[in-house]
Amino acid sequence: MNATERTIAASEFKQRYDDRPPWDIGRPQPFVVYNADQVQGSVLDVGCGTGENSLFFAERGHDVTGIDFLSDPIESATHKNAQRGLNVTFKQHDALKLSQLNQKFDNVIDCGLLHSFSDTDLQQYVDELAAVTHAGSKLMLLCFSDEEPGTKGPRRLSETDIRELFADRWDIDSMTRTRFVVREDTRANYSEDGPHAWFVIAERV
């Protein structure tokens, strides 16, 4: 794994939300939608942003909790939640302290958070994921892959990186090369068809 010493700071994420971040596309990521039938039971959406993935699963009848460590996207998600007549629990909460939620979930969705952590925080985050899941829980993960050229944006992760990270308490059911969908006005910053990504489905053991 290419060493990354610094987790992306909250202030950097806040600056993105002061404008509108590339990943805030106004709908769930297509690969999440395509694989939604694999999700059964309660859902924790970690790094939920303005809540589109959370709201999508709530519309499908799931009990959903969405967390983000910034207040602005949580406020936006809460507003959408009310507008759409849904019942998602949105909270401002640190993903490195998931165990403080004192709750176990049947599924965890991480759509673009894992790749924002430093080496040290990355391992802590994986430990925290284990704390809020049980045997049989599913993890649905979308992150930047090592096929994305350049250094703009978050760290890149290889297949080996991901398999090593989740080796202890997870079985990886599938790893698929895909793309993040980003806003059209930000596409010039990434590969032509969107940033190269991994879509991972894993089961807690």
Image (cartoon, rainbow, N blue to C red):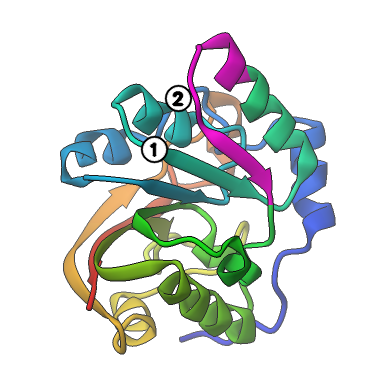
User: Observer-nearest residue: 124 or 85?
Assistant: 85
Q: Label 1: which residue? A: 63
In the image, residue 81 lies in the stretch drawn in magenta: yes
Residue 151, position as x, y percentages in the image: 60, 65
Identify the residue at horizontal 79%, vertical 57% (top origin): 10
In which quadrant of the rendered view does residue 35 lie?
top left
Which of labels 1 and 2 is toward the front?
Answer: 1
Q: From the viewer's perspective, is 188 left or right of 163?
A: right
> Dot 2: few (<14), some (14–19), or many (≥20) neighbours within 10 Å?
some
In the image, residue 157 lies in the stretch drawn in magenta: no
- As displayed, is residue 156 above or below residue 25? below
Dot 1 or dot 2, earlier in sequence: 2
Q: From the viewer's perspective, is 109 left or right of 17?
A: left
> Dot 1: few (<14), some (14–19), or many (≥20) neighbours within 10 Å?
some
Residue 64, position as x, y percentages in the image: 44, 39
Identify the residue at horizontal 16%, vertical 38% (top origin): 37
Identify the residue at horizontal 57%, vertical 82% (top origin): 124
Q: Label 2: which residue? A: 27
Residue 179, position as x, y percentages in the image: 35, 46
**Residue type at tag 2:** Arg
Quarter of the image with the C terminus is bottom left
- As displayed, is residue 178 above or below residue 187? below
Boundaries of the magenta span: 80-92
Identify the residue at horizontal 84%, vertical 54% (top origin): 11
C-alpha distance separating marks 1 and 2 = 19 Å
Q: From the viewer's perspective, is 129 left or right of 170?
A: right
**Residue type at tag 1:** Asp
Tag 2, which secondary structure?
loop
Residue 197, position as x, y percentages in the image: 37, 55
In which quadrant of the rendered view does residue 119 lie?
bottom right
